[in-house]
Amino acid sequence: MSLSVGAAGMNPLLPPGAGASASRMSSLAGQGGASSDFSRMLVDSLNSTAGMQNRADQLVQQGIAEGDVSQVETLASIKKAELSLKMMMQIRNKLMDAYSEIRQMQL
């Protein structure tokens, strides 16, 4: 259950064909202005979510292989990763709604 942000230009939080990837967003974060702060925050959040997913995977694997990880610690890590992913999905949904609304505006 790992989240690979930017792997092969794909981002699981964006719908297919959206054309934005974490690496593209990272390059946008290097540009100036308030958009760079927002882009940087978004990329950091994606990376944090991916890190939580990876940590949960590691704990599950350790628990299965070695058995030295408590179930409480493993389940807490999985829950944190799940909540983080749900929040990122809601952010993505709001951004896509805003984008659709802007596209429908007439000039």
Image: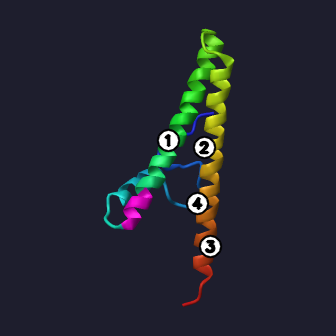
Of tags 1 and 4, the one toward the viewer is 1
Q: Which residue is at a point 59% across and 48% down the rendered structure image?
A: 12
**Circles 1, 2 touching at the beta carbon (< 8 Å):** yes
**Element carrying mark 2:** helix
- Disc 4 residue type? Gly
Q: N-terminal of the two: label 3 or label 1?
A: 1
Give the CA separation, mark 3 to mark 1: 27 Å
Q: Is residue 4 visible?
A: no
Residue picked out by circle 4: 17
- Disc 3 residue type? Ser
**Circles 3, 2 touching at the beta carbon (< 8 Å):** no
Q: N-terminal of the two: label 4 or label 2?
A: 4
Q: N-terminal of the two: label 1 or label 2?
A: 1
Give the CA separation, mark 4 to mark 3: 14 Å
Q: N-terminal of the two: label 3 or label 2?
A: 2
Residue picked out by circle 1: 48
Q: N-terminal of the two: label 4 or label 3?
A: 4
Q: Is residue 20 visible?
A: yes
Give the CA separation, mark 4 to mark 2: 24 Å
Give the CA separation, mark 1 to mark 2: 8 Å
For disc 2, the neighbor class at 10 Å (few under 14, some 14 to 19, many from 20) is some
Image vertical order of residue 3 relative to residue 72, above or below: below
Residue picked out by circle 3: 100
Residue range of the region highlighted in magenta in the rendering = 34-39
Residue picked out by circle 2: 84
Q: Nearer the viewer, residue 38 or 12?
A: 38
Snapshot quadrant of residue 39: bottom left
